[in-house]
C-alpha cells in the first residue's frame, strides 16, 4: 500500500498472501501483522509453511496472490529493497566452507559495508573471536556453523531478522548467546520472526506466538477475535 | 478438474459452432485461415509436383526448393517473432504473459520448420553440390539457430512460476539475438579466409521461369499462413494450460486450507 | 540503496576476491581441472596420431581443451554458491546481481587464463608448435578478450543453470553454441600466432577484433541479464 519507505508502520503486513512452491501452495492465504520491536514465534507442525513464510518475508519468493509489505516496501514491486533490509537464517547457513569463520563474517559484513569493528564484535558476540575464528567452516561442527551464520547475520545489521530453527544444533551456551543477541537487536530497533519447534526455548523469548497450520497463520491467544477466516 | 466450464476466460469465447469440440482453440477466423491454408497447400502440391517444369540445370531436384525456401523463411520469421515478443514482454510495463506465449509458440514452430529446412537443404545440397553439408555462413548460422532455440525450449521447460518462465526465456531469447549475428559473422570471416572451392564457386543460380517463381511465392505464402495458424492455436493452448495451472492452484489452495481446519479442530489450544 | 550502498564495482571486487580465495584454499581448479585439461591434450595426441596433424591442429585443440574445462570451472564456480545456500544468501543480502556477475566473471577469467597458458605451453611441448616474438604478442592479445568473453558467457549461463534440475546437461546445451564464435576466432588467431598450417601472423588481428566485440557484447548483455535470469 504505502509506496515509500515507512519506518512508522508495521514491519510486516500480509493480506491473504499466497506463495507457491512448484505447484504446491505452501502458503494458502496468510494474513498477519508484525509491529516494530516484536519477537514473533511461528510455531506449527512440519510442512505447515513456516519456512516459506520466512522466505516470503525475506523477498526470496514471489507473492502468488494477495498483497503485503515488509519494512515498508511492497512485496510485489520492491523485493530488491526488502532484501537489503532483512536478514534470513534459513535451513542452510549460506557459508563458504573453504573459507574461515572470520572470512565468512567479513564477506557477509562487507556486502552491507560493515566496518572492521562491527565484524569483530559480531564474532565476539557469538563466541567465535578466539580459537575458532581462523578455522575453515567446513571443519566446524553443525552447531559451530550455526553460530557462524548467526555472526554473519549480526554483521549484516538487518531491520528484520527472520530465523528458521535457529536453536537447532546449538549448545546451551550458544542458545543463551542467541537469546541475548536477539534481545540486543530488538533493543536496537530491529524486529524478529522465529520459526521453531523448541517451544520452551523460543516461547520464553517471544513476545507473541503465531500458529502456522496448513499454510495459514492464526492467533492462538483470543485477545480480540480468532482467525479471520 | 472438469467441474466448472468457465476455465480460461481468454480461450473459451469461441461463440460459433465448433462441432463436437465445445470450447476449443478455434475461432471463426482461424477456421477460415485453416481452410485457406489447406487449399493453398493443395495448390502448392499441384504446382510444385505437377504443373511447374523441371529446372534446366538442376532437373527435378529444384522441386525441393519450394519446401525449403518456404520453411526457411518461416523459420527465420518465427525466430524474429520470438525475439520481438520477448522484448515486448520485458519492455512493456503491461508485462503481458500473452507475449511470452506467442514467443514460446513461435519458437516451437520455428524449431520444427528449421528442422525441415536443414533436412530439405541438405538433401538438395547433396543433389546439387554433391554434398550434404557445406561450411557456409548461412547454413552454419541456421544450424546454430536451431540448436540455440532447442536450448531456449529447454529453458522454457525448467519450471517455476509463469512469470519466472516468461522472464527467463525472454532474456535467453534476447541473448540469442546477440549470439546469432556473431556466429554468422565469425563463420563468414572464417570461410572467407579459406577461399577453397566451396559454394561460392559453383553455379547454383536457379533461373526461375514464371510458373516456377509463382510456385515459390505460393509455397511461401502457404507456409506462412500455416505458421500463423499454428501460432494462434498453440498460443491459445498455452493460455489454457496456464489457466489450468491456476485452476489447479485454486483446488490445491482449498485443500491446503482444509488441512488447517482439520488441524485446529483436533488440537487443544496450548497457550504459554 | 540506503544500507551501505556498495557500488557494483566494489561488489564485483568483493565477490571476485572471495571466489579466488576459495580456490586458493580448496585448490580444486589447480589440483583437478588443470590435470584434466592436460589429460585432454594427451588424449587428443592419442586420437590424432600423426605429428604433422597435431602441429597443424594444435591451436584448435588448445581451445577445445579450454572450452571443455570452462564447463567444469563454471560448474565449480556455482557449486560454491549453491552448496550451502549462499546464492540465496547473496540475494537476501541485496548484493547487486551485476556486481555478482562481474565478480564471478573476473574470478573465472583469472582461472581460465592460467589454464590457457598451461595449454599453450603443453601444445608447444607436446605438439611441437613454435612461437616467435610477434606471435607471442598476438597470442597474449588473443588470450585476453577470448578469456574475458568465455568468462562472461560461462557466468551468465552458469547462473541460469545453477539450482535448476538437470543443470549438468542444460549448461553445455546453452553454453556451447554461444562460445562457437570464440572457438573459431581464438583458434584462427592462435593459428596465426603459432604459424600453424603456414598462417601468417598478421592474419590473426581481425580475429582479435571479433573477440573484443564478443567480450564487449556479452559483458554488457550479461550485466543486464544476470539479475532477471537468477531471480525467482
Image (spheres, grey):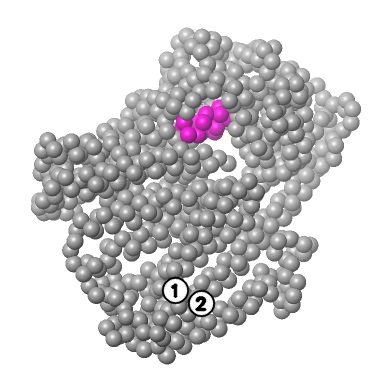
Which residue occupies 52% across, 18% down? A113
Q: Is residue B75 magenta?
A: no
Query: Residue B56, position in %: x, y?
Result: 29, 86
Q: Please state the extent of the stretch shown in magenta in the rendering.
A: C86-100
Report, in whole angstroms, how far the alpha carbon at label 1 lies from the one at label 2: 8 Å
- Residue C169 appearing in the image: no
Q: Chain of mark 2?
A: B
Which of the two discs, 1 and 2, labels the residue nearer the N terminus? 1
Depth check: A25 or B185 in front? B185
Residue under label 1, please give it: B70
Which residue occupies 55% across, 20% down? C4
**Residue C72, located in which quarter of the rendered image?**
top left
Which quadrant, please, contains the C terminus of chain B? top right
Query: Residue A116, position in %: x, y?
Result: 49, 11
Q: In the image, is residue B242 above or below residue C118?
A: below
Label 1 CA crowd tier, 10 Å (few <14, some 14–19, many 20+)? many
Q: Taking B264 as reference, is B11 left or right? A: left
Say how many tags the image has: 2
Query: Residue C195, position in %: x, y?
Result: 12, 46
Q: Is residue C95 magenta?
A: yes
Residue under label 2, please give it: B222
Given contact means CB atoms under 8 Å apart, are the residues at marks 1 and 2 in contact? yes
Depth check: A79 or B267 in front? A79
Q: Chain of mark 1?
A: B
Depth check: B162 or B50 in front? B50
Which quadrant, please, contains the N terminus of chain B? bottom right
Which residue occupies 27% across, 62% down? B135
Which residue occupies 32% across, 80% down? B207
Amino acid at each position: 500500500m504505502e509506496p515509500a519507505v515507512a519506518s512508522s508502520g508495521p514491519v510486516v503486513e500480509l493480506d491473504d498472501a499466497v506463495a507457491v512452491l512448484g505447484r504446491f501452495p505452501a502458503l494458502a492465504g496468510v494474513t498477519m501483522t508484525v509491529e516494530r520491536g516484536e519477537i514473533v514465534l511461528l510455531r506449527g507442525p512440519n510442512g505447515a509453511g513456516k519456512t516459506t513464510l520466512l522466505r516470503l518475508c525475506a523477498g526470496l519468493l514471489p507473492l502468488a496472490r494477495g498483497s503485503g509489505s515488509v519494512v515498508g516496501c511492497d512485496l510485489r514491486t520492491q523485493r530488491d529493497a526488502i532484501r537489503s533490509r532483512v536478514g534470513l537464517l534459513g535451513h542452510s547457513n549460506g557459508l563458504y566452507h573453504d573459507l574461515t569463520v572470520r572470512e565468512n563474517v567479513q564477506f557477509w559484513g562487507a556486502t552491507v559495508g560493515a566496518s572492521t569493528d562491527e565484524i569483530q564484535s559480531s564474532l565476539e558476540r557469538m563466541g567465535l573471536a578466539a580459537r575458532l575464528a581462523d578455522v575453515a567452516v567446513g571443519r566446524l561442527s553443525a552447531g559451530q556453523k550455526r553460530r557462524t551464520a548467526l555472526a554473519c547475520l549480526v554483521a549484516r545489521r538487518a531491520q528484520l531478522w527472520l530465523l528458521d530453527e535457529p536453536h537447532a544444533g546449538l549448545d546451551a551456551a550458544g542458545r543463551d548467546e542467541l537469546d541475548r543477541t536477539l534481545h540486543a537487536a530488538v533493543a536496537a530497533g530491529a524486529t524478529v520472526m522465529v520459526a521453531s519447534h523448541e517451544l520452551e526455548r523460543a516461547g520464553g523469548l517471544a513476545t507473541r506466538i503465531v500458529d502456522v497450520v496448513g499454510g495459514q497463520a492464526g492467533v492462538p491467544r483470543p485477545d480480540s477475535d480468532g482467525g479471520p477466516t | 478438474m472438469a467441474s466448472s466450464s468457465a476455465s480460461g476466460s481468454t480461450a473459451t469465447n469461441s461463440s460459433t459452432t465448433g462441432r463436437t469440440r465445445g470450447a476449443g482453440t478455434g475461432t471463426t477466423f482461424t477456421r477460415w485461415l485453416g481452410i485457406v491454408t489447406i487449399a493453398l497447400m493443395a495448390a502448392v502440391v499441384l504446382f510444385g509436383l505437377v504443373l511447374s517444369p523441371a529446372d534446366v540445370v538442376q532437373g527435378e531436384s529444384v522441386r525441393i526448393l519450394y519446401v525449403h525456401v518456404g520453411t526457411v523463411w518461416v523459420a527465420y520469421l518465427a525466430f524474429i517473432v520470438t525475439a520481438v515478443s520477448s522484448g515486448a514482454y520485458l519492455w512493456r510495463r503491461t508485462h503481458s504473459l500473452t507475449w511470452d506465449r506467442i514467443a514460446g509458440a513461435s519458437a516451437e514452430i520455428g524449431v520444427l520448420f528449421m528442422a525441415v529446412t536443414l533436412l530439405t537443404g541438405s538433401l538438395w545440397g547433396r543433389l546439387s553440390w554433391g554434398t550434404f553439408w557445406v561450411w557456409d555462413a548461412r547454413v552454419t548460422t541456421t544450424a546454430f539457430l536451431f540448436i540455440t532455440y532447442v536450448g531456449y525450449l529447454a529453458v522454457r521447460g525448467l519450471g517455476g512460476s509463469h512469470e519466472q518462465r516468461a522472464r527467463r526465456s525472454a532474456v535467453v531469447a534476447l541473448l540469442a539475438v546477440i549470439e546469432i549475428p556473431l556466429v554468422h559473422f565469425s563463420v563468414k570471416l572464417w570461410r572467407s579466409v579459406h577461399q577453397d572451392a566451396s559454394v561460392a564457386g559453383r553455379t547454383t543460380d536457379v533461373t526461375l521461369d514464371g510458373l516456377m517463381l509463382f510456385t515459390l511465392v505460393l509455397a511461401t505464402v502457404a507456409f506462412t499462413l500455416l505458421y500463423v495458424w499454428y501460432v494462434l492455436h498453440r498460443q491459445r493452448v498455452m493460455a489454457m494450460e496456464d489457466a489450468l495451472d491456476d485452476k489447479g492452484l485454486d483446488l490445491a489452495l482449498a485443500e491446503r486450507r482444509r488441512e488447517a481446519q482439520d488441524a485446529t479442530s483436533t488440537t487443544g489450544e496450548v497457550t504459554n | 540503496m540506503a544500507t551501505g550502498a556498495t557500488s557494483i564495482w566494489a561488489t564485483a571486487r568483493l565477490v571476485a576476491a572471495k571466489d579466488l580465495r576459495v580456490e586458493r584454499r580448496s585448490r580444486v581448479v589447480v589440483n583437478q581441472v588443470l590435470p584434466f585439461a592436460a589429460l585432454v591434450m594427451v588424449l587428443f595426441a592419442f586420437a590424432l596420431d600423426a605429428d604433422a596433424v597435431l602441429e597443424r591442429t594444435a591451436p584448435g585443440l588448445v581451445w577445445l581443451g579450454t572450452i571443455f574445462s570452462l564447463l567444469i570451472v563454471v560448474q565449480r564456480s556455482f557449486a560454491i554458491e549453491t552448496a550451502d545456500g549462499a546464492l540465496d544468501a547473496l540475494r537476501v543480502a541485496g548484493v547487486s546481481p551485476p556486481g555478482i556477475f562481474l565478480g564471478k566473471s573476473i574470478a573465472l577469467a583469472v582461472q581460465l587464463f592460467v589454464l590457457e597458458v598451461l595449454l599453450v605451453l603443453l601444445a608447444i611441448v607436446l605438439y611441437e608448435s613454435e612461437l616467435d616474438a610477434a606471435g607471442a604478442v598476438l597470442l597474449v592479445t588473443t588470450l585476453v578478450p577470448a578469456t574475458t568473453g568465455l568468462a562472461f558467457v560461462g557466468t551468465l549461463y552458469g547462473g541460469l543453470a545453477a539450482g535448476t534440475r538437470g543443470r549438468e546437461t542444460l549448461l553445455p546445451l546453452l553454453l556451447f553454441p554461444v562460445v562457437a564464435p570464440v572457438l573459431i576466432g581464438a583458434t584462427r588467431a592462435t593459428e596465426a600466432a603459432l604459424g600453424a598450417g603456414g598462417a601468417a601472423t598478421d592474419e590473426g588481428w581481425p580475429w582479435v577484433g571479433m573477440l573484443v566485440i564478443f567480450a564487449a557484447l556479452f559483458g554488457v548483455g550479461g550485466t543486464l541479464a544476470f539479475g532477471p535470469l537468477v531471480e525467482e
